[in-house]
């Protein structure tokens, strides 16, 4: 790989997961929704997804109701030590994961000691392997009882989330260094629009979801205060989905569209929480080209989800964030849906060169978390999108197999570490 290796010695090279997407056996508002909608999603898959580039290879799974149920996940809840061994063999030194609120407080006001014991062991096993734990507190899922109360659609409910934050701080504040409060709050409240109007959680009117986003901003601010009061040495941030927005033409409308996309999508959350972020975390999956106010991306290359791929945009976003906020920047998610492993090595190589260039421009980058370590449950799409560095054969005892791209990346990381 052609790069100058400006990555600092303590740079965090890691992978991300989320409890609901890999653990198995989760009971939360999403698992309830899946069971209620699996047959509908399967029966409408053809009309919703037949435009995808690999539809012929995908449709067998997408038309099956079982595809849309998280169920046993990839059994990460039980097999986490095996998965950490794989991460170590891939030369990763960081791992982002979620502490699932629904496991810790399955009934309102009732803490499950066994769940907390599990996550204590989980963190300990990461640290035994020299892997930095990066804890995420809310990755779109929460207890069923919280959803029945209206979740974040009601401001009075924020106190329940903050109670969970305080409990996590009490239990784990001395064991960890990095905490992410919220994952992609901007996408969570607009997820139905991202899925062609499909009714997915949160199932509220658009105007109500806008206010929900504002409440999530307030929830982050208060969570930050709770966490820092518990342990001032904690590094606290959030993971906001961002894109590299570009004007396809030099017209006023195209430039205005980019300006609006940056302010509304990339900066809205962090502009309002800049004092409550020790680092700026962002998830990056795509570049958006605007021709006027219309999205006009190139026809190729596209990943299995039909998203145009331009991995080099990640470094450009990182540089903009550094210049805007002057705080350390972490790529909290970044990856590609690629079942045949056709693009992932290219994606990783372009990504690393882009981040190296961002470092050359003075950006204080502290880490990169690839999505995902394991093949995972991809929300309303189900199981067929494959993001994992490690393939998981759910039909044959959940067998784990590192993909060729992961083995290539492992060797690149070894080279980098030898030079720092």
Image (cartoon, rainbow, N blue to C red):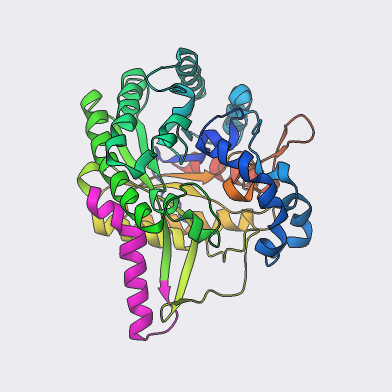
> With 66 as the anchor, is 268 left or right in this view?
left
Q: Main secondary structure of the magenta part?
A: helix
Q: Residue at coordinates 69% horizontally, 57% vertically from top-left?
A: 45
Depth check: give the residue in front, 96 or 132.
96
Depth check: give the residue in front, 364 or 134.
134
Depth check: give the residue in front, 296 or 345.
296
The image quadrant of residue 4 is bottom left
Q: Residue furthest bottom?
A: 251
Measuring from the top left, give residue 361's x and y in whole percent.
33, 60
Q: Is residue 244 above or below residue 121?
A: below
Task: Answer whether residue 79 is visible to the viewer in this image.
Answer: yes
Q: Quadrant of the C terminus?
A: top left
Measuring from the top left, give residue 417's x and y in whole percent.
49, 39
Q: Is 272 included in the stretch rendered in magenta?
A: yes
> With 18 as the anchor, is 235 left or right in this view?
left
The image quadrant of residue 164 is top left
Q: Residue at coordinates 41% horizontally, 68% vertically from top-left?
A: 245
Numbered circles on residues, count: 0
Measuring from the top left, give residue 61's x and y in whole percent.
75, 49
Q: Is residue 112 above or below residue 351?
A: above
Q: Residue at coordinates 34% horizontally, 29% vertically from top-left?
A: 177
Q: Is 248 included in the stretch rendered in magenta?
A: yes
Measuring from the top left, give residue 11's x and y in whole percent.
41, 41
> With 405 as the anchor, is 137 left or right in this view?
left
> With 354 as the anchor, is 171 left or right in this view?
left
Depth check: give the residue in front, 233 or 19.
19
Q: Residue at coordinates 28% horizontally, 31% vertically from top-left?
A: 159
Q: Quadrant of the N terminus?
A: bottom right
Q: State which region is magenta.
A: 246-273
Task: Answer whether residue 388 is visible to the viewer in this image.
Answer: no
């Amino acid at each position: 790989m052609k790069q100058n290796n400006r990555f600092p010695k303590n740079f965090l090279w890691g992978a991300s997961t989320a409890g609901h997407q890999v653990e198995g056996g989760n009971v939360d508002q999403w698992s309830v929704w899946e069971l209620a909608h699996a047959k509908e999603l399967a029966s409408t898959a053809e009309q919703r997804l037949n435009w995808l580039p690999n539809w012929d290879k995908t449709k067998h799974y997408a038309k099956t109701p079982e595809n849309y149920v998280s169920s046993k996940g990839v059994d990460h809840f039980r097999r986490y030590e095996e998965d950490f061994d794989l991460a170590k063999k891939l030369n990763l030194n960081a791992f982002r994961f979620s502490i699932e609120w629904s496991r810790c407080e399955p009934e309102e006001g009732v803490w499950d000691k066994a769940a907390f014991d599990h996550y204590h062991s989980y963190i300990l096993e990461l640290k035994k392997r020299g892997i930095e734990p990066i804890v995420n507190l809310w990755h779109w899922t929460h207890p069923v009882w919280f959803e029945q109360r209206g979740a974040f659609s009601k401001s009075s409910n924020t106190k329940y989330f903050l109670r969970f934050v305080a409990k996590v701080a009490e239990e784990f504040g001395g064991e960890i260094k990095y905490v992410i409060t919220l994952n992609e709050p901007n996408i969570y409240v607009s997820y139905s629009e991202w899925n062609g109007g499909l009714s997915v959680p949160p199932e509220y009117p658009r105007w109500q979801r806008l206010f929900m986003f504002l409440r999530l901003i307030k929830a982050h601010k208060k969570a930050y205060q709770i966490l820092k009061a518990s342990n001032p040495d904690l590094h606290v941030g959030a993971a906001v989905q961002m894109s590299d927005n570009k004007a396809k033409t030099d017209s006023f409308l195209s430039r205005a569209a980019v300006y609006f996309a940056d302010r509304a999508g990339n900066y809205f959350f962090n502009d309002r929480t800049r004092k409550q972020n020790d680092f700026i975390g962002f998830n990056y999956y795509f570049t958006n080209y605007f021709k006027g106010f219309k999205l006009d991306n190139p026809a190729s290359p596209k990943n299995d989800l039909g998203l145009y791929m331009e991995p080099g945009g990640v470094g450009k976003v990182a540089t903009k964030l550094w210049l805007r906020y002057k705080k350390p920047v972490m790529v909290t998610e970044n990856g590609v849906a690629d079942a045949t492993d056709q693009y992932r090595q290219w994606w990783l190589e372009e990504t690393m060169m882009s981040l190296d260039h961002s470092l050359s421009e003075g950006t204080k980058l502290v880490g990169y978390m690839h999505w995902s370590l394991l093949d995972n449950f991809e929300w309303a799409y189900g199981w067929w999108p494959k993001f994992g560095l490690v393939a998981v054969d759910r039909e044959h005892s959940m067998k784990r197999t590192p993909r060729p791209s992961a083995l290539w990346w492992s060797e690149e990381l070894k080279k980098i570490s030898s030079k720092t």
